[in-house]
Image (cartoon, grey):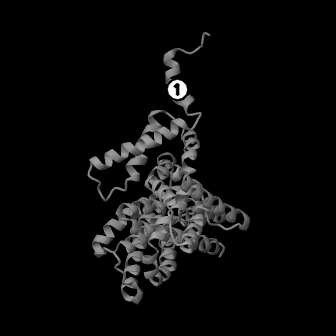
Amino acid sequence: MSILRGFLILVLFFLLGESLRLVFLVPISGGILGLMLLTLYLMVTGGVGNAVAGASQALISVLILLIMPGLTEIFFISGKFTGQWLAVSVSLLVGTFLSVVTTLVLLNVLARKLPSGSSNHE
Amino acid sequence: MNSPLTVWERLLTLSHVLADTPMLVIAMTILAFFAANSVYIAIGRPVWLPPVVPAATILAGMIALLGLDPDSYREGANWLMLLLGPATVALGVPLYQNIHHIRAMLWPIVLTLPIAASLAVGYTLVIAWALGASPTVMASLAPKSVTAAIALGIGDIIGSSVPMLMAALLITGVFTTLCVEVATRLLNITDERVIGFALGLNGHAIGTVRAFEISSTAGAFSSLGMSLTGLFTALLLPVLFNL
């Protein structure tokens, strides 16, 4: 029952995010708005109940299950963009590698340089 | 009572009849999830192979084997993918639980985000443009580091092709986990907060799945990177493509 109650709370935050998206026509998905609202709510109330923590953990542990149906699309759409695949694959692979390296280096350097960056609580 | 079909014929068309309800598709997807899990463990959890890849490959194989139409698979899978909404919200819990780590790294994150998220778009667009990609292709590649639900909304505004946009997202997500694996070794970076943030900023939900395998802290930073990149890119791209 506890997990079900937690699930209900997550769904309600999702619906709240969706409502904000639809009413104010923001280009952000309801899920991301709900995530931010839930984080803010937890920061304000100062704690996660067992129900929400349990439901959240259950959903996060099956995140792959929810993503894999979308990933199968890749096997069924190839061939639709003949002639563009070189530009597509090279730009994605090289561009992604460069931006991963940029993010890692930038954040790593800034985390060391800025005084607040030294946190070793664990 | 005399059906025109024999038992054998009814058996052969069974998968199509069962696929009329989402149950078959849901069972197949969960089955593929467990099968991929066993395969992944059996081959020793190689870091170069994000676990979503064997999962999706096994699933695609099952769809092909049963002769299901990809469209009818998609229709059934939508029932399962409905859970992506609350699952995204659920990422708020580890985010909150790691809020002290995030506070400690607030300024580095605030400074890194606009630069790295712009370059995630920029590098790829410049390379694609140099290789002669069409405007539609450019518009489909631009939201590549944004989580699917937000990316589809951006794609609507800037004129992307939906299948190519989805392919770009998926390739980027999978390749990001690989690149992070390689780059952290080359650069000798071990800070889980940095690794998590890079996974989420570049590799959206697929990167976030990988980050949660590392630790809950990496997962929280990845969720943060994914959310902030989604917000930032949703504001950036409509302006960029209007110029």
Badge 1 marks a residue whose secondary structure is: helix
Q: How many marks?
A: 1
**Can residue B201 be seen at all in this image of the molecule?**
no
Quarter-wise, where is residue A93 in the image?
A: bottom left
Asked if residue B18 is positioned above or below residue A63 in the image, the reply reads above
Q: x%, y% of residue B89? A: 55, 61
Asked if residue B10 is positioned above or below residue B241 in the image, the reply reads above
Q: x%, y% of residue A68? A: 46, 50
Residue displayed at 54% across by 70% down: A42
- Relative depth, front residue between A106 and B130: A106
Quarter-wise, where is residue B32 in the image?
A: top left
Question: Mark 1 belongs to which amino acid?
Answer: Leu
Callout 1 crowding tier (Cα within 10 Å): few <14, some 14–19, many ≥20: few
- Relative depth, front residue between B208 and B183: B208
**The C terminus of chain B: image quadrant:** bottom right
Asked whether, in this view, residue A63 is left or right of residue B153, the answer is: left
Q: Chain of mark 1?
A: B
Q: x%, y% of residue B33? A: 41, 45
Q: Residue furthest top?
A: B2
Q: What residue sits right under mark 1 in the picture?
A: B14
Asked whether, in this view, residue B235 is left or right of residue B106, the answer is: right
